[in-house]
Image: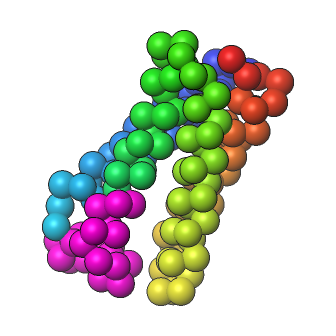
């Protein structure tokens, strides 16, 4: 089970790091043009803040466990990503971007799996 948790955490970390870096590196207008219509409803700072939260969550899933310091931050980071995905799903539902909600639900479920297991019997 520990190996499965590491694999899921690594996949989540890669995905959220990519999403976060994309939001941090590209201007909001370019995100909207590339199909991220939700970005049009948020300010530049909010989009950058979401990207930073995703990147920090990705780091929080891996780094504390990798260096064996403050390992409680792993499930805390997973909970933060769950909260981000709830907000993302609500935003996509409001904009009727239903395919994106499916992606949010899958990422939410994976992050919830990591959070529950790492807070529970598979803590470090």
Query: Residue 85: x and y, percent?
Result: 56, 61
The residue under the point 56% across, 41% down is 77
Residues in magenta, as a range: 28-50
The residue under the point 69% across, 46% down is 112
Query: Residue 66: x and y, percent?
Result: 49, 16
Residue 78 drawn above or below residue 36: above
Secondary structure, magenta segment, majority class: helix
Q: Residue furthest front?
A: 70
**Residue 33 lies in the magenta-colored region:** yes
Residue 13 found in image quarter: top left
Residue 57 drawn above or below residue 62: below
Q: Is residue 53 visible?
A: yes
**Residue 2 lies in the magenta-colored region:** no
Q: Is residue 11 visible?
A: no
Query: Residue 8: x and y, percent?
Result: 58, 33
Residue 67 drawn above or below residue 28: above
The residue under the point 17% across, 61% down is 26
């Amino acid at each position: 089970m520990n190996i499965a948790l590491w694999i899921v955490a690594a996949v989540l970390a890669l995905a959220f790091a990519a999403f976060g870096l994309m939001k941090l590196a590209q201007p909001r207008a370019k995100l909207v043009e590339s199909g991220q219509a939700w970005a049009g409803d948020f300010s530049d700072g909010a989009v950058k803040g979401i990207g930073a939260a995703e990147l920090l969550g990705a780091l929080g899933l891996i780094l504390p466990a990798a260096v064996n310091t403050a390992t409680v931050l792993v499930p805390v980071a997973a909970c933060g990503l769950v909260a981000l995905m709830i907000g993302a799903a609500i935003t996509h539902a409001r904009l009727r971007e239903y395919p994106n909600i499916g992606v949010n639900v899958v990422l939410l479920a994976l992050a919830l799996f990591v959070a529950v297991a790492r807070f529970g019997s598979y803590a470090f």
